[in-house]
Image (tube, helix red, strand yellow):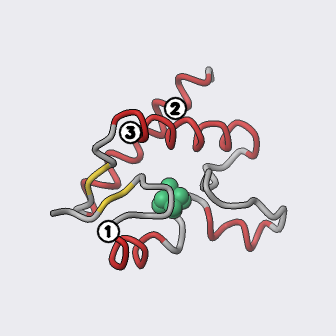
Amino acid sequence: MTFEETKDKIRKYAERYAERKGYRLNPNAEELDLVYEGLAKRREQYGAQYCPCRIVLGDKQEDRKIICPCVYHEEEIEQDGMCHCALFFKAE
Ligand code: SF4
């Protein structure tokens, strides 16, 4: 799979997930693209879409928490209006 195909897969995942959860995606197209890139890079490097804004520890069980959508995003979106990476935003 090429990098662009991986990125496209990530984009589709994020669009579907946002729709299912009633979130919005980052309205800034450039920022959104950077998050997709970060996720795609991690997927290529580690074989899983680890959050690009968090540290991969190398401990499979711990790291599972930061596979997008990470275990933290719901609370972050509720509290801050967006997840740590600014991928998902609270619906208005
Ligand atoms: S902070 Fe956002 S982009 Fe990062 S893993 Fe969590 S939901 Fe995904």
Q: In the rendered view of the protein, which quadrant contains the C terminus?
A: bottom left
Question: Counting other residues with Cα less than 10 Å from the Cα at mark 3, is it few (<14), some (14-19), or many (20 or more)?
Answer: few
- Quadrant hosting residue 80: bottom left
Amino acid, disc 2: Lys
- Residue 54 position within the rendered picture, expressed as x and y whole percent measured from the top left: 66, 60
In the image, residue 75 sits, relative to residue 16, either above or below, namely below
Q: Which residue is mark 1?
A: 81
The structure residue drawn at horizontal position 32% and vertical position 40%, both measured from the top left corner, is: 28
Check whether the beta carbons of the residues at disc 3 and disc 1 lie within 8 A of each other: no
* Disc 3: residue Cβ within 8 A of ligand 1's nearest atom: no
Is 3 left or right of 69, judged from the image as shown?
right
Amino acid, disc 1: Gly
Q: CA distance from mark 1 to mark 2?
A: 25 Å
Task: Classify mark 2: helix, strand or loop.
Answer: helix
Front in this rendered view, residue 85 or 16? 85
Q: Nearer the viewer, mark 1 or mark 2?
A: 1
Q: Which residue is mark 3?
A: 12
The structure residue drawn at horizontal position 51% and vertical position 74%, both measured from the top left corner, is: 72
Check whether the beta carbons of the residues at disc 1 and disc 2 lie within 8 A of each other: no
Question: Counting other residues with Cα less than 10 Å from the Cα at mark 1, is it few (<14), some (14-19), or many (20 or more)?
Answer: some
**Is residue 69 shown to the viewer in this render?**
no
